[in-house]
Image: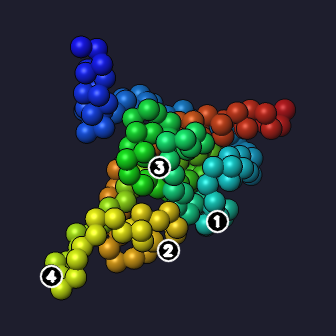
Amino acid sequence: MKTASVPILVLCVALGCATPPAPPKELPAAASRDYDLVWDATVTVLEKHFELWVQDKEKGYIVSTYKRAEPLPDEYARDAQTGYDALEEFLHIVRRRATARVLEDHPGVYGVHLEIIRERQGYVPPKRDYSSSYSLYDRRKTALDDSADQKPTVTWYRLGRDLHLEKKLLERIQVYLNRHARR
């Protein structure tokens, strides 16, 4: 009896019966009176997790390139912060992009506003062409190279913000600010 319930449980989790965890109630603040220190902390922490594409210190704007999560069961270095995200990344190809702003929240106090967007890869359905047979497995569609992302059959569905990863990175930025604060 117990052996029959295990495959049913695995099937329910794989089909989406798992509920995502609740997002953090409030994101931690990462702020300081020293703009240069806030900028350096944000760049340093984001560079450890993403490849930065745009860095404009005068405008306080940082944008990363897309970072793909590898959907491999033996890959433990993925950036999924929760079990639900790890399951979703196992079943689908997911990518993230970080955008950070360093803004003056209060007079003389600069804060980091971080947004990480998650997207899931999908495909446009194949056109019916009855002159050739259709294979369910197309190696080009499942390849994990960046050129596969640009094909016309690839679409990306926005999953929303990754609040758990945002929280972790903001905490690391604040730790950096606390360590390097001028006394």
Which residue corresponds to mark 1? 56
- Per the image, the residue denoted by label 2 is 147
Task: Answer above or below: position of 62 versus 18.
Answer: below
Q: Name the residue under label 3.
A: 71
Q: Which amino acid does label 4 sit on?
A: Tyr
Whole-number angstrom distance, CA of label 4 to CA of label 2: 28 Å
Mark 4 against mark 1, which lies toward the viewer?
4
Q: Which of 82 and 61 is in front in this view?
A: 82
Give the spatial CA distance, label 4 vs label 1.
Answer: 52 Å
Whether the residues at callouts 1 and 2 have beta carbons within 8 Å, the answer is no
Report helix, strand or loop for mark 3.
loop
The residue mark sitting in front, 4 or 2, is 4
Residue at the disc numbered 4:
130
Task: Residue at 28%, 65% (x, y): give it.
Answer: 136
- Between 3 and 8, the one lying in front of the other is 3
Mark in the foreground, 3 or 4: 4
Furthest residue toward top? 1
Q: At 67% from the left edge and 62% from the top edge, which residue is drawn? A: 57
Mark 3 is on which residue type? Pro
* Dot 1 amino acid type: Asp
